[in-house]
Amino acid sequence: MNPVARTAGAFALLLSIILLEITCSPFSDAPDDGGVLPPEQLFLSDDSLAEKPAPLFICPVTRDIRIQDYFAYLDSLVLVYDDLTPYPMTEHLLIRFNAWVIDTLAETDYYRRMERGEFVYDQHQMVVLHKGDSLLIPNAWEAGRLQQRMDMTWLDINIPEFRLRIVEGSDTLYTMKVRVGQNKKRFQQVLNRTADLRTRPGAGQIVRIARAPTLFEDPHTGRRYTVTQRDDGRVTEMPTIPWLEPAINGERLGQMIHPTTNPETLGKAYSNGCIGSKEGDAWRIYYYAPVGTVVQIRYDLQEVTPAGDTIRFPDIYDRYRR
């Protein structure tokens, strides 16, 4: 299809979606405009496109978007703009280009809010995109440059250090304290057997993401729950923050990378094998680690700092006990 026909077809698709009140969107309560402006209002002026970094489109947010509707709203945008951009549009590409959204999501962390004296019982009701905000759609040059960076990004986890690093090529972008599996075995009801709770090292990649987990289950008893008791003793709804599943050494071990609602356990061997992080950090991990991202889980007792100092970590799993 020639470029003129493709552009005309894209406009026709967008206009039909708008006229149908975004019926193909997963929103059940979408407004008449679905949060997307008509085509004639989407393009930037010719002057603004003169510089290479200028975005291709500006998408204004026309109503408040809460966490409970956040993924559905993004899906509706990706559906529309994937037919208007000269590259595959994805949620991760869109939000990485609008990095302020990641910062906003990170600020929904229960404990960050409590530091400001704000108790949040149900994070699902928190507004993360406000009416009047705008999301920028990158042009082909910016999208290609960003996609290259995303393809070079990987996760590095050192078990005895209790650290997860987001690395781009050889540059560490973020370092986060995590918790890891306990140094023991225990019977788990959901498996109907005794399981080794230690986090297993190895190399692999992210193979699955649960964007909005709703089933929380105690693996030892099989009991399901919807609320959590925080470190400060208060009870809240469970947050909806994505969980990532890596396959390590070709095996899906159930070692999820996910947030914990009890950050006092970070820096400890406390979990059932999963890698736990702060809620705010979990949002950042999610957007830097889409499916296919390389994951390396190490058990290194020695680390050399950028300054050249050598740090030794405790052998929490007694792997090198003489």
Image (cartoon, rainbow, N blue to C red):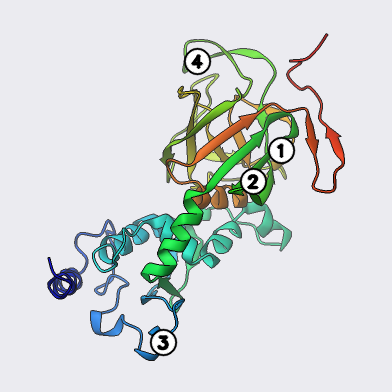
Give how far across and how far down residue 252 sits, in percent: 46, 24
SS at mark 4 in the image: loop
Query: How many labels, in total?
Result: 4
Q: What residue lies at 74% left-to-right and 15% top-to-bottom?
A: 319
Answer with left or right where residue 60 lies relative to residue 128: left
Location of residue 265 by image quarter? top right
Q: What residue lies at 30% left-to-right and 73% top-to-bottom?
A: 36
- Between circles 3 and 4, the one closer to the viewer is 3
Asked if residue 319 is positioned above or below residue 20 in the image, the reply reads above
Query: Which residue is label 1 attached to?
Result: 266
Q: Camera-side residue: 192 or 231?
A: 192
Task: Looking at the image, tell me whether mark 3 or mark 1 is earlier in sequence order.
Answer: 3
Q: Local crowd at mark 2 within 10 Å, few (<14), some, or many (≥20)?
A: many
Give how far across and how far down residue 183 sits, in percent: 70, 18
Three-letter amino acid code of the residue under disc 2: Lys
Task: Looking at the image, tell me whether mark 4 or mark 1 is earlier in sequence order.
Answer: 4
SS at mark 3 in the image: helix
- Between circles 2 and 3, the one closer to the viewer is 3
Three-letter amino acid code of the residue under disc 1: Leu
Three-letter amino acid code of the residue under disc 4: Gln
Query: Which residue is label 2 attached to?
Result: 278
Task: Looking at the image, tell me whether mark 2 or mark 3 is earlier in sequence order.
Answer: 3
Query: Which residue is label 3 attached to?
Result: 48
Q: Camera-side residue: 78 or 230?
A: 78
Location of residue 277 by image quarter? top right
Label 2 close to label 1 by CB (< 8 Å): yes
Label 2 close to label 3 by CB (< 8 Å): no
What is the distance, in whole Å, between disc 2 and disc 3 at their CAs? 40 Å
What is the distance, in whole Å, between disc 4 and disc 1 at their CAs? 25 Å
What is the distance, in whole Å, between disc 3 and disc 1 at their CAs? 47 Å
Task: Looking at the image, tell me whether mark 3 or mark 4 is earlier in sequence order.
Answer: 3
Q: Local crowd at mark 1 within 10 Å, few (<14), some, or many (≥20)?
A: many
